[in-house]
Amino acid sequence: MSDESGRSLIDEEGRLFGLVNVIDVLVVLLFLAVVVAGVVLLLPGGGEADTRYVTLDLGEQPEFIAEQITSGDEWDPEGTGDTLTITDVYRFSDDGKTSVTVRAMVNGTVFEPEETGVDPVFEFLGDPLRLNRTLDVETTDYGVTGAVTRVDRSGQDLPVEQTAFVIETRLGSGTIDEVDVGDQFTVADSQFAEITDFQAYPGEDGNRYVLLAISAQTIDRGGTQLFANRPVRVGTTVAFETSEYELDGQIINRGSGAIETDGQPLVIQTTVPTSVASDVQVGDEFTIGGTPIVTVEEVTAYATGEADTRRIVLGVSALTRTEDDSVLFGDRKLRIGSSIPVETGEYNISGEVVRRDGLTEPGTPVVRTARLQLKNIRPERAEVIREGQVERIRGTETARIVEKTDQPAQVILTSEDGNIFQREHPRNKDIELVAELRVRELDDGSIRFRGDTLLAGQTIQLELGSTTIEAKLVEFTDG
């Protein structure tokens, strides 16, 4: 055999190009094939490129580092074909410190073990990729260290979701003015949580009881949603921070991004200075954070027998909520006898709840005829008590004298020897009045007069114009 130049590829002695014996070449090639096959047998499986998805807990990080960690960041260790690419990032703040968790795609090598029934081993940078392994991630912009908390064959996203819950807290009057719907809790320039609803109520010592509905990014760990590394469940205390304020609150409800409230009609009553009673008007509002929590719908003022004080009965609409079948005003259960404050720019009062299901006083309004007695009254005082006198406060008539009779006062005297005598007083009078009283009759038969229960035998005071009298209620004469 020869080429075009006439030179033979294999000469008569079996040499290739006249240099190497063909038989020797075949022997060498056979030897190399055996060596390669042996290497393959010594390294079962030989290793194949494969991909895993891992969750890395990077722990606390400086703010400037946390801001730089983003999806798409790559780590290409020199001298290997292995790579790590960040596919998702979750940042949260706990006690003012920023922590970071990432999801990453890891390209490495999977090896089939020689033993049967044993799972393949995935290696990254020459070591098995297992839980709790620590990885030193080095990108062109930063270096961080994280612990492997999860390894999967697929899934580039972290189990992060928006979770809604409501917290309760107590804030000073200065802080409450800064809180508003839309306030955001940011971590490393990323929104972590937002206030979606807000309601404040009066609290103790001048503070406010506050409800905040929050929508937050939470992460699932072992079936539990975590917010700032705390489980999102009723009773857990969590923090919320903005550039203006920081607060801690306890979760009281989850699953709702709104605070469900309702306007509850109530009747409250209290005794106040006469000047304050004049200030209270229909339409007055007790407002916190821009929301009216108590609105005055009805006002009735009554005499007390003291010219400088008045009993006021208010029909109000109060912003309440329901929890475990209980109606709450702020953090207090709303019962008969509970106290409800009303604060405006003109006055600050607190009234006792006497009715929970309406705006008017309990009972049916009626006029009852009563017999009243005044004993041993001086003549000058007796003369100013006249038929036709009326007790009227803020245009509302509560009592009218329709009949008056008097007679010399009967007084009891004791002689020097101890004997007791009844005699007529030479000047003073005993007076009997028939009065029409505007009262309210309750279903149980009891009677309320000017906001208080009235019984025979009680002493009542009537403000009859410029004259105030104190009389005993003997009986109701009309039944």
Image (cartoon, rainbow, N blue to C red):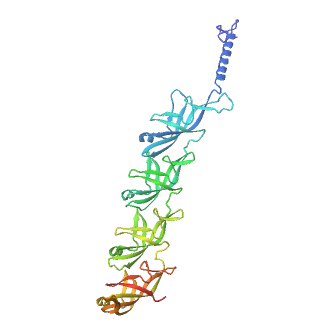
Q: Is residue 336 above or below residue 415?
A: above
**Which quadrant of the structure image shows residue 370?**
bottom left
**Horizontal side, residue 309 vs residue 265: left or right:** left
Q: Residue furthest top?
A: 13
Give x and y (percent) for residue 290: 41, 63
Res. 252 in view: yes
Q: Residue at x 39, y 82 (%)?
A: 459
Give x and y (percent) for residue 125: 54, 29
Res. 289 in view: no
**Horizontal side, residue 266 vs residue 106: left or right:** left
Q: Is residue 425 above or below residue 120?
A: below
**Which quadrant of the structure image shows residue 83?**
top right
Q: Nearer the viewer, residue 373 or 97?
A: 373
Quarter of the N terminus within the rendering: top right
**Which quadrant of the structure image shows residue 107?**
top right
Q: Nearer the viewer, residue 256 or 465?
A: 465
Give x and y (percent) for residue 43: 64, 24
Q: Is residue 291 above or below residue 60?
A: below
Q: Residue furthest front?
A: 417
Q: Residue at x 39, y 50 (%)?
A: 243
Give x and y (percent) for residue 223: 57, 47
**Horizontal side, residue 407 vs residue 479: left or right:** left
Number of numbered callouts drawn: 0
Q: Is residue 396 above or below residue 208?
A: below
